[in-house]
Amino acid sequence: MTVELVWWLLGAALLVYLLTGGADFGGGIWDLLARGPRAQSQRELIARAIAPIWEANHIWLIFVVVLLFTVFPDAWAAISVALHIPLTAALVGIVLRGAAFVFRGYGLQTPTWRSVWGRIFALASLLSPFSLGLAFAALATGDIRWQNGAVQSGFFAGWPTLFAVDVGLMTVALCALLAAVYLAVEADEPLAEDFRHRAFFAQLALGITGTLALWGAAGDAPAFLAAIAGPAGPIAVLAGTMLAGFATLFLLRQRRDRAARVTVAAQAVGVVLGWGFAMEGHLVRPDLTVHTAGAQAATLAPLGPALALGAAVLIPSLWCLYRVFKRR
């Protein structure tokens, strides 16, 4: 097992988490924004879509955390200290949305209290992806400094920036887009048409926030922006992501929801892949790369067999779960 392979495994796990857990966050966002005569039906569809599988999706976030602190302990130390505030906000959101979802669905409260729990679920679903976006943006700014085995830049480096806010909003928009397309597949008319319209708005928001993020990077993350604009790889990924976005809009307009689900997933792949290319092997810019983040040969040697054993248990279990509850 090499550190480069671990880097790719981290990216793959983040992508799967975005495609699954990110869409769950997006469902909560649409629960918050449900309007019109079919608002209650929209919320019921979201609850039915999320309920069977939603907690299982967090296994990928756990995998990322465990792999990070096992293989790259210096990067984990820097991230957990410098980004303590946004990461705590994200975790609070995950816990609150889980508790609120259960209390709203199965609690024996009055309708007023169910409405309160529903609002907590929805707001927490907005908080978590925004906070995670802040954290990922901070890693690219170069403001977090790691020297002499400790963070030197404090708790407010990188994430209270215009670039980070733009990336946080972009993350929210991407999660909402994924959820809207997935729900269009699961719904019958006229609810499917409702979520097609929401997907159009989310796609527009994603384009705007993505453009703002590039603009914000010019001032807050110049090295990251230079990496995007420099080599052919990130530019090609960015162009492919844009094409996938237009394809998603076209397919939704044609009511080909299943095909749109493939192209919107390709958009998510493009975002994660482009981010990985632009980071140029850095876990935390500018001081921690995959080669300087504390990886040890004694840790890397047994990692491959351990991951293979875990995958032999995890992947069939998840396949069975989705096969039973997500045939559509």
Image (tube, grey):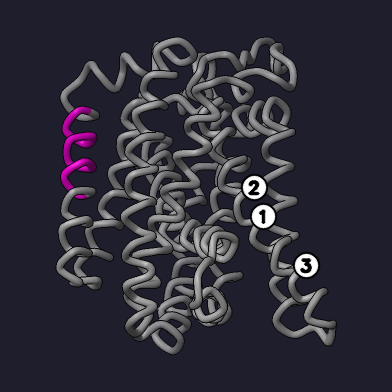
Give the Cα distance between marks 1 and 3.
11 Å
Magenta range: 235-244
Determine the image quadrant of residue 76: top right
Task: Report if residue 147 lies within the magenta region.
Answer: no
Q: Residue at x 43, y 78 (%)?
A: 316
Asked whether the residues under the numbered discs 1 and 2 touch, taking CB atoms below 8 Å apart as contact, a structural biologist would say yes
Mark nearer the viewer, 1 or 2: 1
| Residue at image mark 1 | 123
Q: Is residue 279 visible?
A: no
Please tell me whether mark 1 sits on a helix, a strand or a loop.
helix
Q: Nearest the camera: 275 or 171?
A: 171
Q: Is residue 180 above or below residue 157?
A: below
Disc 1/disc 2 C-alpha distance (Å): 6 Å
Q: Is residue 159 left or right of residue 38?
A: right
Q: Give the class, few, some or many, for how many residues have Cα within 10 Å of label 3's Cα (few <14, many ≥20).
A: some
The label nearer to you, 3 versus 2, is 3
Q: What residue is pinned by disc 2?
A: 127
Q: Is residue 165 above or below residue 285?
A: below
Give me the disc on residue 116: 3
First-in-chain label (1 vs 3) = 3
Q: Which quarter of the image is occupied by the C terminus?
A: bottom left
